[in-house]
Image (cartoon, helix red, strand yellow):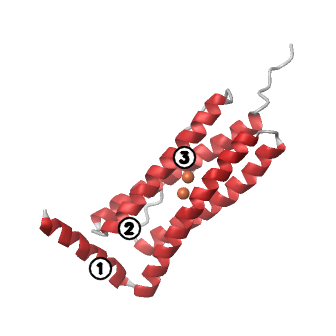
């Protein structure tokens, strides 16, 4: 008997790699978020939370596409969470995560196109555009930290105290 092969298997495998990566990234950013919040760095903490939610939304879109193509979803994170405590190290790592995700999604969009799946190609392209925004914002934060040193983060703590006093 002939084996039934899903003609979208190339896409399904790439989409699952992407889901596992998005989940790992979301968990990593939640870890950074709780650390930053605990340290009182209100604004960077909030931004990190927002990006974590973006990555969760990405994983959901990818998962929906996998089911649509008749595959099954692998939700196991591709990497364990790194327990980084230093703020600059967090942002440097986050920026590098975004860069490699952009590289992957660009390459994977091309492979999906080659396999004749332009809808998944477009999904990877759309996600790559959002990851570029993340990367750019992480880079700007990192630049501010390098330019203004601890003052930049200290001012965020002051802002936090100010908002607490108003409550
Ligand atoms: Fe993402
Ligand atoms: Fe991202």
Q: Which quadrant, please, contains the C terminus?
A: bottom left
The residue where tag 2 is placed is 44
- The answer as to whether callout 3 falls within 8 Å of ligand 1 is yes
Crowdedness near tag 1: few (<14), some (14–19) or many (≥20) residues, C-alpha within 10 Å: few
Residue 5 position within the rendered picture, expressed as x and y whole percent measured from the top left: 80, 25
Q: Residue at x 64, y 40 (%)?
A: 16
Q: What element carries label 3?
A: helix
Residue 141's place in the image compared with 46, above or below, is: below
The residue where tag 3 is placed is 58
The residue where tag 1 is placed is 154
Gap in Å between the C-alphas at discs 1 and 3? 33 Å
Q: Which residue is drawn at 28% across and 63% down?
A: 38
Q: Which residue is drawn at 46% across and 68% down?
A: 90
Residue 73's place in the image compared with 35, above or below, is: above
Q: Is residue 20 left or right of residue 10?
A: left
Between discs 1 and 2, the one toward the N terminus: 2
Gap in Å between the C-alphas at discs 3 and 2? 21 Å
């Amino acid at each position: 008997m002939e084996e039934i092969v899903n003609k979208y298997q190339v896409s399904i495998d790439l989409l699952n790699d992407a889901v596992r990566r998005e989940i790992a990234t979301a968990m990593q950013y939640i870890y950074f978020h709780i650390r930053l919040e605990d340290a009182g760095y209100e604004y960077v903490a909030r931004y990190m939370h927002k990006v974590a939610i973006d990555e969760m939304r990405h994983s959901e879109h990818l998962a929906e596409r996998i089911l649509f193509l008749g595959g099954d979803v692998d939700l196991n994170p591709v990497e364990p969470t790194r327990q980084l405590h230093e703020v600059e190290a967090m942002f440097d790592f986050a920026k590098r995560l975004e860069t490699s995700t952009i590289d992957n999604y660009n390459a994977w969009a091309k492979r999906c196109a080659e396999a004749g799946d332009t809808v998944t190609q477009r999904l990877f392209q759309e996600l790559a555009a959002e990851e570029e925004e993340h990367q750019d914002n992480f880079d700007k934060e990192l630049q501010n930290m390098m330019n203004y040193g601890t003052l930049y983060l200290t001012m965020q703590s002051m802002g936090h105290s100010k908002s607490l006093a108003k409550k």
